[in-house]
């Protein structure tokens, strides 16, 4: 019984001590919070200045009626009372000094408010939105009288690369002869008026959006030999008179006795040793009848037996071709034409052997036949081989045979195709006439690499090309 009474007395004493501790903590917390508030001490400069200002009778301003810690609802901060009577002004020496603060500025310097009160006028001013409004861009809507349109472009010159970068952005309000006109832009670097760069054609619009980039190779100022090139590199105002070109009448003005006019382009690639011919269009063809269908044959003289031919345009005297042709130098061992296709879903590589031409047969060995052997290689190791049927005694055999190989997409970086033209003679003797290897950069270059890359970029499509047969080196 005595032990239970001792426990009760101990618990009571402990509870009282806990309550005393909590009360003492609350008192200390209130005193600590009271020290955090701003308190004006007697004899401070703010009190003295406030008393001096209140004693002046010639000023119409009255002391602040509200408390020092009050603030209007639109100002997110409060100036401490001890600092309300001073202002900080920077000096040239890097120090700061106090400037006298006038709690009631002149009424003509204060912004007027609807309420007419001056109490809110002594606070930090608000932002004036009118100062940050930009004028509306009317370059796409306001056009002067007689304006034929407006063109947006950018110009930048790269000193190290010695090239002029022209960015063609857009055109607006073009005065086209009809709504069906399709505008394009030609860029000339004067004084050379023969060479130009041309943008893509935008179909049936008077407000085309180009977003194209062009590059002119231009020497810097210290290397430029002519004044025109020197002027082309400088930034200045554009004189419209310098950029007016005569109207193109090549499609309308034809001399007497003219049988027609043909547009084409020619370019020679030195590294690939090939001639590129672009067949563009023909106009005003004097056909025997309106039902004639024109085409163009291209010969590389002096060889008049071999030619390239365009597609036939049905019943027109103004055909539009837009075709490209490639003339390769005469090959020593002949040429082979075949198609490539890759189906990434089935992991299948397809080869279509079409034809060969200009083969150098060994005709002094009796009856000969020619076939093509197609081999799939991986890391220069033989994987699988297939053969076409043999064609008897022709230097221009036609095959049109299709072969398929199983090749995973992950193996295409190390795989290659070898197509070898083989001649069979009497007695089952064979002789290799030439070979073509197509594959990735590891094995090929030039047209063979382009053919392989184009096949990968166009899955499930047949990509057809001619290739020159090369001599087979003996192992």
Image (tube, helix red, strand yellow):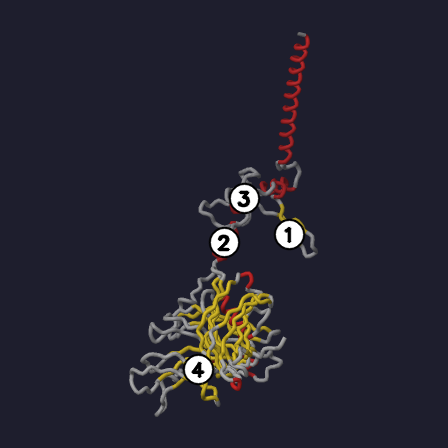
The numbered mark at residue 308 is 4
Q: CA distance from mark 1 to mark 3?
A: 23 Å
Can residue 238 be seen here? The reply is no
Which is in the foreground here, disc 4 or disc 2?
A: 4
Which of the marked residues, 1 or 3, is nearer the chain's N terminus?
Answer: 3
Up the image or down, 79 lies above or below 128; here it is above
Q: CA distance from mark 4 to mark 2?
A: 74 Å
At 47% from the left and 60% from the top, the residue drawn is 346
Q: CA distance from mark 3 to mark 2?
A: 17 Å
At 60% from the left and 74% from the top, the residue drawn is 161
The numbered mark at residue 89 is 1
Which of the marked residues, 3 or 2, is nearer the chain's N terminus?
Answer: 3
Q: Secondary structure at mark 3?
A: loop
At 59% from the left and 43% from the top, the residue drawn is 79
What crowding class fits label 4: few (fewer than 14 Cα within 10 Å), some (14-19), or many (20 or more)? few
Which is in the foreground here, disc 4 or disc 1?
A: 4
Q: Position of residue 360 (x, y in %)?
A: 52, 83
Query: Is 86 left or right of 397, judged from the image as shown?
Result: right
Which of the marked residues, 4 or 3, is nearer the chain's N terminus?
Answer: 3
Residue under pointer 3: 76
Could you say which is closer to the camera, residue 260 or residue 417? 417
Q: Secondary structure at mark 2?
A: loop
Label 2 close to label 1 by CB (< 8 Å): no
Which of the marked residues, 2 or 1, is nearer the chain's N terminus?
Answer: 1
**Which residue of the protein is positioned furthest toward the left in this rendering?**
290
Residue under pointer 2: 128
What crowding class fits label 1: few (fewer than 14 Cα within 10 Å), some (14-19), or many (20 or more)? few
Q: Position of residue 108 (x, y in %)?
A: 51, 52
Label 4 close to label 3 by CB (< 8 Å): no
């Amino acid at each position: 019984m005595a032990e239970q009474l001792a426990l009760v007395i101990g618990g009571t004493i402990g509870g009282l001590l806990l309550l005393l501790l909590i009360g003492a903590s609350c008192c200390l917390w209130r005193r600590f919070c009271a020290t955090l508030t701003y308190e004006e001490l007697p004899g401070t400069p703010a009190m003295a200045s406030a008393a001096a200002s209140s004693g002046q009778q010639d000023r119409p301003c009255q002391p602040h009626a509200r408390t020092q810690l009050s603030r209007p609802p639109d100002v997110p901060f409060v100036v401490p009372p001890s600092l309300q009577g001073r202002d900080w002004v920077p000096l040239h020496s890097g120090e700061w000094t106090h400037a006298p603060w006038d709690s009631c500025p002149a009424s003509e310097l204060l912004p007027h408010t609807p309420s007419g009160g001056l109490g809110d006028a002594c606070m930090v001013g608000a932002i004036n939105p009118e100062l940050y409004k930009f004028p509306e861009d009317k370059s796409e809507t306001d056009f002067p009288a007689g304006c034929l349109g407006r063109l947006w472009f950018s110009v930048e010159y790269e000193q190290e690369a010695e090239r002029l970068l022209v960015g063609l952005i857009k055109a607006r309000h073009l005065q086209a002869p009809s709504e069906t006109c399709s505008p394009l832009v030609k860029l000339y670097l004067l004084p050379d008026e023969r060479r130009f760069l041309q943008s893509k054609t935008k179909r049936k619009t008077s407000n085309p959006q180009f977003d194209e980039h062009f590059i002119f190779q231009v020497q810097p100022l210290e290397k430029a030999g002519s004044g025109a090139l020197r002027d082309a590199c400088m930034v200045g105002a554009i004189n419209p008179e310098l950029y007016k070109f005569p109207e193109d009448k090549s499609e309308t003005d034809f001399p007497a006795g003219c049988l027609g006019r043909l547009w084409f382009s020619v370019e020679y690639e030195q590294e690939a040793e090939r001639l590129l011919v672009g067949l563009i269009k023909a106009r005003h063809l004097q056909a025997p009848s309106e039902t004639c269908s024109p085409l163009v044959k291209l010969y590389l003289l002096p060889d008049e037996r071999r030619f390239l031919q365009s597609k036939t345009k049905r019943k027109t005297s103004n055909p539009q071709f837009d075709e490209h042709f490639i003339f390769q130098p005469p090959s020593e061992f002949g040429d082979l034409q075949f198609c490539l296709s890759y189906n990434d879903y089935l992991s299948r590589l397809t080869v279509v052997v079409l034809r060969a031409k200009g083969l150098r047969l060994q005709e002094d060995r009796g009856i000969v036949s020619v076939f093509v052997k197609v081999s799939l290689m991986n890391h220069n190791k033989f994987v699988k081989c297939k053969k076409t049927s043999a064609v008897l005694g022709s230097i221009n055999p036609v095959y049109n045979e299709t072969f398929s190989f199983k090749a995973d997409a992950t193996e295409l970086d190390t795989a290659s195709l070898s197509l070898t033209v083989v001649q069979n003679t009497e007695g089952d003797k064979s002789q290799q006439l030439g070979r073509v290897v197509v594959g990735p950069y590891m094995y090929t270059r030039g047209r063979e690499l382009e053919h392989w890359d184009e096949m990968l970029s166009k899955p499930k499509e047949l990509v057809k090309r001619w290739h020159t047969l090369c001599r087979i080196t003996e192992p």
